[in-house]
Amino acid sequence: MVDIAFGPEPGPRPNLKDPREAYLEMVRRKRMYGGIIMVLFVAFMVSGWMLADQRNAGGFWEGLHQVLEFPSEVLSEAWAKLSNLPGIFIHHVPALIETLNIAAVATLIGALAAMALSLLATRGLARWPLLIPVFRRTMDALRAIPEIVIALVLIYVLGGGPVPAVIAIALHTGGALGKLFSEVAENADLKPVEGLASVGATWGQRMWLGVIPQVAPNWLSYALLRFEINVRASAILGFVGEGGIGHDLKLAMQWGQGRYDQVVAIFLLLFLAIVLIDRISDHFRHKLVKGH
């Protein structure tokens, strides 16, 4: 019979009658396996780093001393024009509002899609159990494709603007939240669902009355967290022509010297907005999950 605890290879076994000896032998084996894994990990990291450095347009070590030159140039110009920052803040507030609107609408649409996908992909709750793998793979596909790839494709179809950004972020959000929502729904108590089924409730009624009241706090918490992520995503999509404050940041950086005060102002404005959203959503997530 194979000794599962100490491996199938032949050799002397520890005296299992002595618990201390058996424990020490298991610790030694775990340390040995951990050391082997660590050596392999370091070897792969070093080889990957060397390959990336060889394929890079310039050498990493040769250019390392220049890493702070561009940030210092930007900050020095912004410091010299410090008095202009309040006016630049006010000028770019409409673009920030557009970015927040893109993130909010995309989060709402993605969350609604995630609710449907998660319930259809959860064992014990699915309307069509045989199609559970189909809905799960759909969520996997939506999560696997980055928002910027979807946005670049939609630009050729719909042109630039906020609509492609909303669709791209909503699709990715549907896949990401669908996975999280499904994991929460799997832990829901099925007794209310069974009770509703016994009195002839439809599948939609069972989900609405028996499942959603249980999972709503966690679902809302995940949706608020995703909204923070989508604010960052909508700003990034501005670099590919999707509007919002990211587009203004791209234009300011393209102009180069003479516009670096705008670059710093936009960065600060976006940073402050994300911090404010993070604090507000963290407060509401805490209340939803903890109940106080």
Image (cartoon, grey):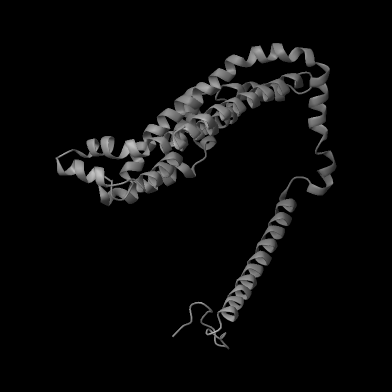
Residue nearer the viewer, 285 or 278 = 285
Q: Looking at the picture, how far across and down is residue 9, in whole percent?
A: 54, 84
Q: Looking at the picture, how far across and down is residue 128, in whole percent?
A: 25, 47
Residue in the picture at 51% in, 82% down = 8
The quadrant in which residue 215 appears is top left
Give the quarter of the figure containing the N terminus.
Answer: bottom left
Q: From the viewer's perspective, tell me whether residue 246 is left or right of residue 265.
A: left
Q: In this view, does 201 lie above or below 8?
A: above
Residue nearer the viewer, 65 or 11 = 11
Residue in the picture at 42% in, 38% down = 218
Residue nearer the viewer, 97 or 180 = 180
Q: In this view, does 21 lie above or below 122?
A: below
Residue 56 visible somewhere in the drawing:
yes
Q: Looking at the picture, how far across and down is residue 74, in whole percent?
A: 79, 26
Q: From the viewer's perspective, tell me whether residue 90 is left or right of residue 60.
A: left
The quadrant in which residue 234 appears is top right
Q: Is residue 68 above or below residue 27?
A: above
Residue 153 visible somewhere in the drawing:
no
Q: Looking at the picture, how far across and down is residue 84, in whole percent?
A: 75, 13
Residue in the picture at 75% in, 19% down = 261
Total numbered labels placed on residues in the image: 0
Residue in the picture at 46% in, 37% down = 290
